[in-house]
Amino acid sequence: MVSTPHGAKLLRATTGEGAKDAKYVADDLLKVLAEVGAEKVVCVVTDSASVNEKAMKIVTENHKHITWVRCTAHAINLIFKDIGKLSWADEVVSNARKVVKFIRRYTRTRSMYRKCVRALPVGAEGRNLELFLPADTRFGSNVVLCDRMLKVREALTRVVSDPDWDSWCAEKNLKIRSNGLEVSALVRTMASGLI
């Protein structure tokens, strides 16, 4: 990707098939620098992988005016992942995922959720928001998940407080009934501000 006063342009994408050692990465970067004109480049941004650090040492040996910048978004994502490994954070995220997965898994529970989220007052935080599970590879996915859960906690509380919820869970097999009770308890804990 090359950034110019006229906007960003995708110059080339490489698959990196085979060995992705520092020499491979450096050679690829040097080809791009030759194509663009190394004198026009002031900075190269990559993630902070050690292979990139070694590759940039090779590149800057011949192009001392080029600075290597580690991608801030990548660094923040790594920080979020480390925080997510703390036991309390892992528990919060795990519980949020349990709630979302259970409600999304069944047509009836999805329908109950949608009815409750649409019944929130106009302008209420969370009104008309769907439940979703961001991909693990997405930046800050656990933060996005927990933020959404906070926004829809009123609707979730209405779902597990609805008599239809209890009767639906009671009709199901032991595993679904048990999971439904666990989800109810998690939502009530979240609504009370303990999560």
Image (cartoon, rainbow, N blue to C red):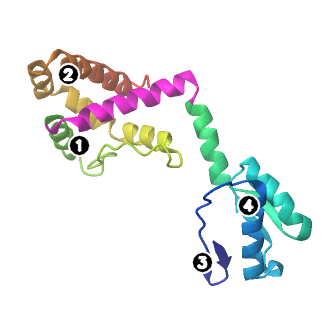
Mark 1 secondary-structure assignment: helix
Residue underneath mark 1: 117
What's the residue at 49%, 49% (across, down)?
Answer: 138
Question: Which is nearer the N-term, disc 1 or disc 4?
Answer: 4
As measured in the structure, the alpha-carbon distance from the residue carrying label 1 to the one carrying label 2 is 23 Å
Note whether residue 64 is visible. Answer: no
**Would you say residue 96 sits in the magenta stretch?**
yes
Residue underneath mark 4: 24
Q: For the residue marked with disc 2, what is the amino acid? A: Ile
Find residue 17 and report its horizontal and vertical position in percent.
Answer: 60, 58
Please provide percent x and percent y for residue 114: 19, 43
**Residue 9 image label:** 3
Is label 3 or label 1 in front? 3
Which mark is in front, 4 or 3?
4
Q: Residue at x 81, y 53 (%)?
A: 54
Precedes in sequence: disc 1 or disc 2: 1
Name the kind of residue labelled 1 in the image. Answer: Val
Check disc 3 and give the amino acid type: Lys
Q: CA distance from mark 3 to mark 1?
A: 41 Å
Which circle marks residue 186 in the picture?
none
Displayed quadrant of residue 58: bottom right
